[in-house]
Amino acid sequence: MSEHDVLNPGQMPQNPEKATLEGKNKFMGFWFFLGGEAVLFASLFGTYLALNDSTNGGKSSEELFGLELVFIMTMLLLTSSLTSVYAMYHMKNNDFKKMQIWLGITVALGLGFLGFEIYEFYHYIHEYEFTLRSSAFGSAFYTLVGFHGGHVVFGLLWIVSLMIRNAKRGLNLYNAPKFYVASLYWHFIDVVWVFIFTVVYLMGVL
Amino acid sequence: MSTLVATNKKSFGSTIWDYLTTVDHKKIAIMYLIAGGFFFILGGLEALAIRWQLVQPMNDFVSAGFYNELITMHGTTMIFLAAMPLIFAFMNAVVPLQIGARDVAFPFVNSLSFWLFLFGGIMLNVGWFTGGAADAGWTAYAPLSTTSPGQGVDYYVLGLQISGAGTLMGGINFLVTIVNMRAPGMTYMRMPLFTWTAFVASALILFAFPALTVGLFLMMFDRLFGSGFFDPSMGGNSVIWQHLFWIFGHPEVYILALPAFGIFSEIISTFSKKRLFGYTAMVFATVLIGFLGFMVWAHHMFTVGMGPAANSIFAVATMAIAVPTGIKIFNWLFTLWGGNIQINTAMLWALGFIPTFTLGGMTGVMVAAASADFQYHDTYFVVAHFHYVIVGGVVFALFAGTHYWWPKMFGTILDEKLGKVTFWLFFVGFHLTFFIQHFLGLMGMPRRYWTYLEGQNLDLGNLISTIGAFLMGVGTIVLLINIIKTSVKNEKVSGDPWDGRTLEWAIPSPPPFYNFKQLPLVRGLDPLWIEKMEGRKGMTPAEPLTDIHMPNNSFIPFVMSLGLFIAGFGFIYQKQDIAWLSLVFVGMGITLGCMLLRSVKDDLGYHIHKEDLKKEAGE
């Protein structure tokens, strides 16, 4: 049996992302990677909490943040996590077309989030002159939220390239783990945002 | 390369290309050994320059500024570019063999880890040629590091960032390898202790390195992009760096020490001809040390002013680590007890390690006492302490492991006579160098000062210390001669020269590139020994002879790492001239492009057919 036949079985298994050893390795390795990412963000959160009052005479978080915008952003990102769950549901049912559609919706919601975030940063910089260089608070804010934003950009590029690459050939046991792992990454980004929403915005305003 | 004819004579160019593109864990191990060995010698030369400067009071062998660069680069090089890669060399060479696997879980990522480490290491050292290397100490405390002029500290930050990424990937790789790739019957509690320590050390890497990553990012932003994390005039706080650095830095000590313990456990058990005493306790002590390793970072910061409550908690937690470590020391002694002991070079290092490391542990408990630490802090007492632990523990283990696993890695055996000469020169030299430093420290000599005054009773101690350092240097040269002599002689040995106990000794030396023709069936701890005791020559196969699936070689890891290397220069010099930013785009473009290429291009590997395997065996 050639490699091609192994990866394209007549009947897709229940969990195509974990059907091969490579898939199992990828699945586990990615969970470990997310463990490391959790420490990375924990370090950034710790730094932010230590510096969020160090405004250096500039605007404080109460004066800067508006919960309306952040609420919309949160809804967009939370919904995108849900749609990526739908995509994975269709992957397990071996329905490639529906998976692509739901991944497309996920990407659209992610882009919406990103657009609002860019607007938010632009607003702070031009209206309030609140930048990375204005205070330790500014440094900590842009680094924490910016790292998250960077993860969103990377996640979007990743999902889009997977969608384009596999658009013609559909699902197999080689690319199923890739889709699955990318969706795990997307969930992780969402979880981090929940903490940012709480620690940075809610605690900053209330 | 779907045939087995890989051992034919190859041109020099194709050998180089083979190593640049290899994903074979055994070849990557050899590259780690060579690169780590190179940096070990570099760091050693820096150490000798430090000692030569301190040979007499008011010496002016080097300037004060250059001395700062020497101490910074000595520490950084030895920890990140010598000890870590050499540990990875043995993890790569041995762990897949010990668990009966054909490679690591992610061979491609394994190669990427190596090249990231190497390019990061080169980056760190580029500073020497561009107006001065990093000079803020290996700990790079802010604000000393954030205000250090020149680009030295920038190279430190970017170099460590790149090589740290490689280390993190290596850690994940070994975690998954050990969880998913064990041969049939190789349960967790049958894993050799070196594999266990590699496993726990990998977990420590996974959870410790991201803290360093963040610390380095913050420092990079402060130095290169004008942020104010560590700058009090912008409301920043320089103690944040210390916390992030030591949240990484203390587990790092165990990342190095635990595999060292593993190496000694293998050697002591093999050459005592006994099962490791208290195997279960050893495993749990390893896990416990790994866990406690995260609870003690602030003992490096007793004098910062965290207050008595924090100091007490961290002092007690630190002292608690002495318990599992003590368990290990006693288990090694009980393994020796009543054993049929064979003393060769590897065993000599192990026997030298036990008292040496115990001394380092004793002074460890001393500096863990927070109130007393106010006296020891930043003196030569601390320098003596951590060299007893890192050299007496880790470097001794690396020497021991080199002798023990050299036959498995290269198929030849290092000369015993020269090996023993190396041991005695290094062992005596080591104690001569560092034992006296305890007393220099207690007499008040501060670390990191480039010179000292006459008439303070520091002269003789420093002279002795310098003599010892040069003895270590001579010992290392003898090892290099030994390696050259052995390689030139090229006398092949059998696959099992030590009458070994674990799986790596069940296959030829050096192993075929697919490691195990048939995966072995593991029936207990020390699986090969069990088979030997029951009169079999080798392992019982757990599977019929079938096609073996192998990964393809790839040049992408090299290029991907090169991209980050190029981007590093852009980040550093965009501060002078914004045009350098173009290098960031070029470099990051190369790296991200490689990632995209890797993602979209299928890499299915190839099969070795069982007919070829049979043909090779002459059937």
Image (tube, coloured by chain):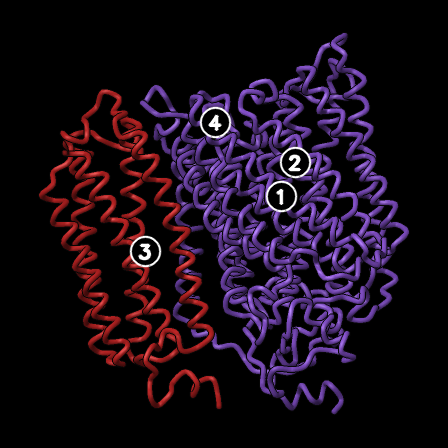
Chain colours: A red, B purple
Chain-order first, disc 4 or disc 1: 4
In the rendered image, residues at marks 4 and 3 fall on the same chain: no
Q: In which quarter of the image is residue B437?
A: top right
Which residue position holds label 2? B361
Residue at 85% in and 53% down: B343
Rate crowding at label 4 as few (under 14), some (14 to 19) or many (20 or more) other CA atoms within 10 Å: some
In the rendered image, residues at marks 3 and 2 fall on the same chain: no
Most distant residue in the top direction: B455
Residue B325: mark: 1
Q: In which quarter of the image is residue B484?
A: bottom right
> CB of mark 4 within 8 Å of CB of mark 3?
no
Q: Quadrant of residue B354?
A: top right
- Mark 4 to mark 3 CA distance (whole Å): 44 Å
Chain-order first, disc 2 or disc 1: 1
Residue B312: mark: 4
At numbered mark 2, what does the secondary structure look like: helix, strand or loop?
helix
Residue A154: mark: 3
Rate crowding at label 3 as few (under 14), some (14 to 19) or many (20 or more) other CA atoms within 10 Å: some
